[in-house]
Image: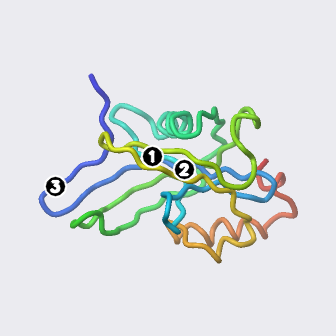
């Protein structure tokens, strides 16, 4: 059986089920954004049929970053509504705290190029390390998750104590 993304269109709406990782290193968080866009999102993708959200997240990090990750724990569950093409989209997302198995798998600062594919179409991306202290100054999707990440910053003295690398 060929696995298909849990992403479907009905007559009047789209449904999307995603898993995404929150990767923090040296007080910076790794985000992605389409080239020539200014809206960042958490790295991940659609969960496929007969695949757990954790399996999907590991697959997405391997496909997009060629990086092996450990999944620490579920950080947040998001339910958002937004327009996609000409229809409203109802999206459920699971956000996990993740860490790299090998720090040399990816560039650990700045911005570096990558891409993703959806329905056979290639999308060029920038992967960007953003300073945790400036998350309120950039556009992040979903915006509802940013306060929880910022709150976490101020609940213990160091990133390592907060479960980040």
Q: Which residue is mark 2?
A: 43
- Look at the picture and state if 25 lies above or below 132: above
Q: Is residue 103 above or below residue 12?
A: above
Q: Secondary structure at mark 1?
A: strand
- Residue drawn 52% across and 71% down? 144
Alpha carbons under labels 3 and 2: distance apart: 26 Å
Residue at the limit of the structure toward the top, as seen here: 1
Determine which residue is flagged by label 1. 45
Q: Residue at x 78, y 70 (%)?
A: 154
Name the N-terminal-most of marks 3 and 2.
3
Q: Position of residue 77 (x, y in %)?
A: 50, 57
- The location of residue 19, given as percent across then percent down, is 48, 47
Query: Residue 10's mark?
Result: 3
Name which quarter of the figure residue 6 lies in. Answer: top left
Tag 3 secondary structure:
loop
Task: Please name the residue shown 63% across and 46% down the image.
Answer: 73
Look at the picture and state if 92 lies above or below 101.
below
Q: Answer left or right for 2 relative to 11.
A: right
Which of marks 1 and 3 precedes in the sequence? 3
Nearer the observer: mark 3 or 2; the answer is 2
Marks 3 and 1 sit apart, C-alpha to C-alpha, by 20 Å
Determine whether, in the image, residue 85 is placed left or right of residue 75: left
Which quadrant is home to the N terminus? Answer: top left
Looking at the rendering, which quadrant does residue 156 occupy?
bottom right
Give the class, few, some or many, for how many residues have Cα within 10 Å of label 1's Cα (few <14, many ≥20): many
As drawn, which residue projects farthest toward the right? Answer: 157
Q: As displayed, is residue 137 above or below residue 121?
A: below
Camera-side residue of 57 and 78: 57
In the displayed orientation, state which residue is furthest to the left.
Answer: 11
């Amino acid at each position: 059986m060929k696995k298909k993304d849990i992403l479907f269109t009905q007559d009047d709406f789209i449904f999307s089920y995603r898993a995404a990782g929150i990767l923090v290193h040296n007080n910076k968080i790794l985000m992605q954004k389409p080239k020539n866009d200014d809206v960042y999102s958490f790295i991940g993708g659609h969960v496929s049929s007969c695949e757990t959200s954790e399996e999907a997240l590991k697959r997405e990090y391997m496909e997009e970053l060629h990086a092996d990750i450990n999944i620490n724990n579920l950080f947040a569950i998001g339910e958002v509504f937004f327009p996609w093409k000409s229809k409203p989209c109802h999206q459920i997302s699971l956000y996990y705290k993740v860490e790299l198995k090998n720090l040399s798998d990816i560039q650990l600062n700045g911005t570096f190029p990558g891409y993703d594919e959806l329905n056979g179409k290639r999308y060029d991306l920038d992967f960007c390390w953003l300073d945790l202290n400036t998350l309120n100054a950039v556009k992040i999707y979903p915006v509802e998750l940013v306060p929880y990440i910022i709150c976490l910053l101020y609940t213990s003295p160091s990133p390592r104590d907060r479960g980040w690398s």
